[in-house]
Image (cartoon, rainbow, N blue to C red):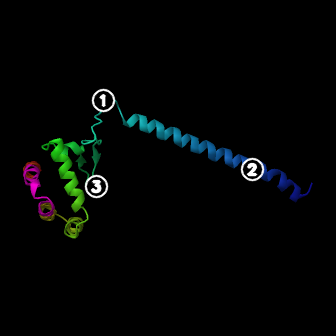
Amino acid sequence: MSIDRLFRLLLPSVFLAFQAVSFLRAEDEQTEQSQQAENTFSPSESTDPITPKVEATSGSAGRVEGTLADKEDDLTPTERQQYRADKAKIHNAPELVEARKVVHQTTGDKSAAIEAKWETKESLILNIDPSAGPILEKKEAEHQEKKGKK
């Protein structure tokens, strides 16, 4: 039997074997993903679209970050929605982008840079929505309270 004939006989079998293995791997990955999705949601969790629950994760500096609701717990749902909409409007403002860069580039104590970014964000929100003053006062009180706990 020539090598050419042997190659023609074995090549389709090898090709089918590779396809079967890749199919089984894809099937296993889909099963794992569906199991992970089932494990991450429990019926007791809130499904409120305004305050989505996010599991506590470790931040880049090793600190534990809580839920999104924890960050805005002093606001009513309407205020929270308005605050988020205002933040989305200013997200790419050049002043705020620059303030974020300064915080990121600062080494050591970043508290002054963070305060400057906070003030920049507040002033930009007030510029686009003067009615956000009471919301920002609540956020400032919450910010000062959290700053005092550190």
- The reply, left or right, for residue 137 in relation to residue 47 is left
> In this image, 24 relative to 53: left or right?
right
Q: Which residue is mark 3?
A: 60
In the image, residue 33 sits, relative to residue 86, either above or below, namely above
Residue at (15, 62) in percent of width and height: 128
Regarding mark 1 in the picture, which secondary structure is present there?
A: loop
Residue at 23% in and 50% down: 63
Pointer 1: what residue?
Answer: 44
Count every numbered label the image shows and give the total: 3
x then y, percent, for residue 14: 75, 50
Residue 109 shows in the view? no
Whether residue 43 is in magenta: the answer is: no
Residue at the outermost top position: 44
The amino acid on which the numbered mark 1 sits, given as a three-letter code, is: Ser
Q: Closer to the N terminus: mark 2 or mark 1?
A: 2
**Magenta span dominant secondary structure:** helix
User: Which is closer to the viewer, label 1 or label 3?
Assistant: 1
Q: How far separated are the C-alphas under marks 1 and 3?
A: 29 Å
What kind of element bears circle 2? Answer: helix
Which span of residues is magenta-colored? 123-139
Residue 28 visible within the image = yes
Tell me how far mark 2 sits from mark 1, CA to CA: 50 Å
Q: Do the residues bearing badges 2 and 3 touch, measured as CB atoms within 8 Å?
A: no
Q: Is residue 9 above or below residue 40?
A: below
Foreground mark, 2 or 1, reads 1
